[in-house]
Image (cartoon, rainbow, N blue to C red):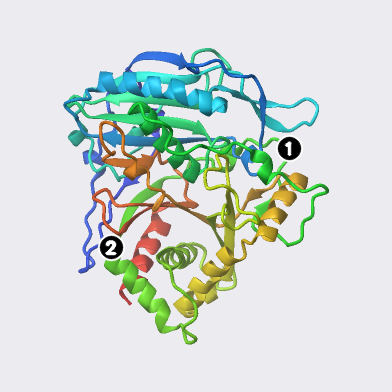
Amino acid sequence: MKTNPLHQQTHTPQRQKMGTSNDHHDVPPSTLLQDLNVTIHKSSMVFPSKEIERKSLFLSNIDKVLTFDVETVHFFGAHKDFPPHVVAERLKSALEDALVVYDFLGGRLKVNNDTKRLEMDCYPEGAGFVVASSEHRLDQIGDLDYPNPAFAQLVHKNKDFLKQGDSPLFVVQVTSFRCGGFAFGISTSHTIFDGLSFKTFLDNIAALAANKPLAVTPCHDRHLLAARSPPRVTFPHPEMLDLPPFPDSSNIFNTSIEPLHFNVFKLTSSHIAKLKLEAQKDNTCGTTRVTGFNAITAHLWRCKALSGDHNPNRSSTILYAVDIRSRLNPPLPMSYTGNAVLTAYAMATCRELEEGPFMKIVEMVREGVTRMTDEYARSIIDWGEIHQGFPNGEVLVSSWWRLGFEGVEFPWGKPKYCCPVVYHRKDIILLFPPVDGGDGVSIIVALPPKEMEKFHGLFHKFLMA
């Protein structure tokens, strides 16, 4: 029986469901299924279906500090033509074929003795593959879009997979439920993919599982994001934190040891339209386009900043990811495999966030995006060549809202829901598509109890103003 160390962590789960009448209800901790009763049946290595050439893969300055693992869970309902054991066989075969095209998936991270840079050795040591089962039905584990720590049991950790000290870059676990439904738990080193390239990978795995050609031919040339020689830092970068060489990035995003409250806030399409309308009221020139993401991010920023230390002169920095593929000159191929996302930022005092017009906050968020030109992106990459930099701010908004994981069409259908395994990280706010589809957004927030109480009040106050 597999146990979950998160069971010992202190957390008070709550679910806030927003409606037009400002109603909400909480799910008591006792109703949250804390043990999925997962049994591991088989762990093995998957190797390429064809012989591949051994080589080393260059990592960009964006890739090489993202050495932590990203764990995602993809839930599927029962399918009469694809029982879980057939799905596991088809998925394993598809992964064997994918390892020919994505040769680094079976490789390992290493430091080049000559350049002292981290890179990927693409020699096929193998990707991990795990077959497991749960004693529960899929409908017994609760709302799939609730950040249940027990979902960690559906993902096998990369570290020490089959032998001590071996850390595969990619491990997939197929867990079957008593109802015939199943879940893929995928653990990848962030050095491999960003969100967009992981979506492309899923599209390709789905195509291979259906015995079809690749949906997209991936571009693996990470020299496209190499630093310039010599590096030229042409902008100040207050959003970056200087780190020692080869940092343990997992410690940067370390889980909190203080008790936190989880909340899942729901914004419907009507709520998002209301936020955009509020901004437009203050848009005297009428030339600034207000996007849903910018309005949501501005709303979350003021709630997060004002729920903490209420010093009106305190400066708050919000971070959010920007895809740079189309912002470079020449543009990167949309099929670029590595990390082509940089962190934009906006800075303001708590007084500005509390007293200023909402449109001003939206404009600051928008300016962070428009700032990300080719030269600015190259400057950040060059800064990383000199300083080993990592994004630094009060809060990071990480959006999975429009990545489209839930739209991937496997032979056994599209997933019911996709989500990352959520840990205690109070400075990261996550955006997801709602579990039932639609144009709304689910927002996961984790904060200490008093801060969460303030955040909740501000969230409703600003939305209903």
Residue under the point 35% across and 27% down: 209
Residue 245, labelled with which disc? Answer: 1
**What percent of the width, then of the height, locates residue 253?**
54, 43
Q: Quadrant of the N terminus?
A: top left
In this figure, which residue is indicated by the disc labeled 2? 268
Closer to the chain start, of discs 1 and 2, is 1
In this rendering, the answer to whether 204 lies above or below 407 is above
Where, by quadrant of the figure, is residue 44 drawn?
Answer: top left
**What percent of the width, then of the height, locates residue 461?**
34, 72
Residue 89 in the figure: left or right of residue 351:
left
Residue 142 in the figure: left or right of residue 259:
left
| Closer to the camera in the image, 34 or 370 | 370
Residue under the point 60% across and 49% down: 332
| Closer to the camera in the image, 197 or 464 | 197
In this rendering, the answer to whether 406 lies above or below 440 is above
Residue under the point 52% across and 23% down: 100
Residue 207 in the figure: left or right of residue 366:
left
Q: Amino acid at mark 2?
A: Thr
Residue 284, labelled with which disc? Answer: none
Q: Amino acid at mark 1?
A: Pro
Q: CA distance from mark 1 to mark 2?
A: 44 Å
| Closer to the camera in the image, 4 or 432 | 432
Task: Identify the secondary structure beneath mark 1.
Answer: loop
Q: Can residue 63 be seen in this snapshot? A: yes
Task: Identify the secondary structure beneath mark 2.
Answer: loop
Q: Residue furthest front?
A: 213
